[in-house]
Amino acid sequence: VVSLKVGAEKEIIRPDTLAFLINLAPSAALDLVDALADVPEEDSREHHPVPIRACVPTGVGPWPVSCAYQLDEHWSWAAGELGRTERGTWPWHDKLARPNPKQGQEVRVQVMRLQGIVDIKVLNALASTKDQRIFSRL
């Protein structure tokens, strides 16, 4: 039996699979999202840990979400590297979840182990689904 993560790595499970499940089997889509969501690897927990509290822009609906579509799977830190902020972080880290341990809210930063997740079929399925539970998992 091929695990879901291996299936996604080998592109047996693709974004259109997720879109199909969102439309026709929302509970199965939730299970797939749970299986493919993972914690990003931290390169330097001492200098730049994955935040557990952050300022997340509030939007419409019960689940505030902040998204950054990046091909990076690592939450990394490197002082002085080209393209990094003066703190050694990637600019998109602050855009996704600006750390604020005192006034922020609890957050869960995840990576989705499904290549091409930002796909028109997935976005269409998300826009048209009546089952809102999927948004509590993304």
Image: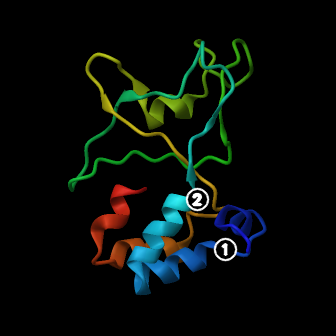
Read off the residue under disc 1. 13
- In this rendering, is residue 84 above or below 18? above
Q: Is residue 45 left or right of residue 125?
A: right
Marks 1 and 2 in Cβ contact (< 8 Å): yes
Crowd rating for badge 2 (residues with CA inside 10 Å; few <14, some 14–19, many 20+): some
At x 29%, y 47%, the residue is 64
Kindly identify the residue that appears in the image at 48 percent across and 67 percent down: 31
Earlier residue among tags 1 and 2: 1
Distance from disc 1 to disc 2, alpha carbons, whole Å, reads 10 Å
Q: In the image, residue 80 lies at what x, y percent?
A: 72, 12
Viewer-nearest residue: 113 or 72: 113
Tag 1: amino acid: Ile
Report which residue position mark 2 lands on. Answer: 36
Q: Amino acid at mark 2?
A: Leu
When asked about the image quadrant of residue 55, the answer is: top left
Tell me what residue is drawn at x 58 percent, y 13 percent.
87
Left or right, 91 with reference to 80: left
What x and y, as percent, mark residue 19? 50, 78
Query: Quadrant of the image for the N terminus?
Result: bottom right
